[in-house]
Amino acid sequence: MWCTIPDVTAALSLAPADDALAAADAGAPVRRSRAERQAIVLDTAERLFAGRSSRSVGMDELVRETGLGKMTVYRLFKSKDDLVGAYLSRKAATVLAFIDDELVRLKGDPRAALLSVVDAVERDVTRTGFRGCPFTNVSSEYDDPQHPARSAAADYKFALHMRLERLADEIVPGAGEDLAAQIHLIIDGMYLSGGLLGPDGPASHGRQLAERLINLSAARV
């Protein structure tokens, strides 16, 4: 989930098919909104960064792959650092929206909601082509703690932890902080282990461990 949670970034239709064909036949450029141009750039960045690393992808290559003009891309993102930060921020918004939908769906059952987060992580780390958590992978490429990638990753981790703690507080009133921290560590461990050792390694035990910790915490109430 987490890191990609099943990545639910929807493909955007950039223009009605008939209009796009007509524009191509007429030799006229396809007119796109700013949001559509941003989506093209970020979708391209996601594909390239996921396949290699953000540092190994130069802006000239990225611009070329978007099919947009260089000035168009730089009007949207003033630098590659800004683009990398925006890429992670968009991914964070997608993941957190997924979690929030799950919290609504499972309202009144915090145990099920907390385990649904871990279940989503398990699905993510066992999918074909999984290469580790993008928040960890990308942010670790930059040493500066103020780099947009580091900031976006930290903001995401904080927002995730707040949601875990809110659910844990419902399970263990007044003592949810410890349970949330333990579940968060399990999630991070599943991503690290899954990326390095594959889905059959220690990551495959994450869900079982999370359930055991939740049950032990609830039993002490």
Image (cartoon, grey):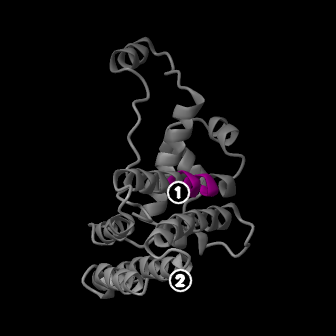
Place of residue 165 in the rendered image (x, y in percent of width and height, measured from the top left):
53, 70
Is the residue 51 above or below the residue 76 in the image? below
Q: Nearer the viewer, residue 98 or 39?
A: 98
> Does the magenta run of residues contain 50?
no
- Residue 201 image-quadrant placement: bottom left
Residue at x 38% of width, y 58% of height: 108
Q: Check disc 2: other Cα within 10 Å, few if <14, some if 14-19, many if 20+.
A: some
Q: Nearer the viewer, residue 35 or 160?
A: 160
Residue 178: mark in rendering: 2
Labels 1 and 2: the sequence-earlier one: 1
Q: Nearer the viewer, residue 122 or 195?
A: 122
Measure the alpha-carbon separation of dots 1 and 2: 24 Å
Q: Is residue 220 left or right of residue 142?
A: left
Residue at x 44% of width, y 78% of height: 183
Residue 32: mark in rendering: none
**Dot 1 corresponds to which residue?**
92
Residue at x 68% of width, y 61% of height: 148
Q: Secondary structure at mark 1?
A: helix
Is the residue 204 above or below the residue 67 in the image? below
- State whether the magenta stretch is mostly helix, strand or loop: helix
Residue at x 66% of width, y 72% of height: 142
Tell me where the magenta segment starts and ends, as one range: 84-92
The C terminus, quarter of image? bottom left
Place of residue 212 in the rendered image (x, y in percent of width and height, measured from the top left):
32, 85
Q: Secondary structure at mark 2?
A: helix
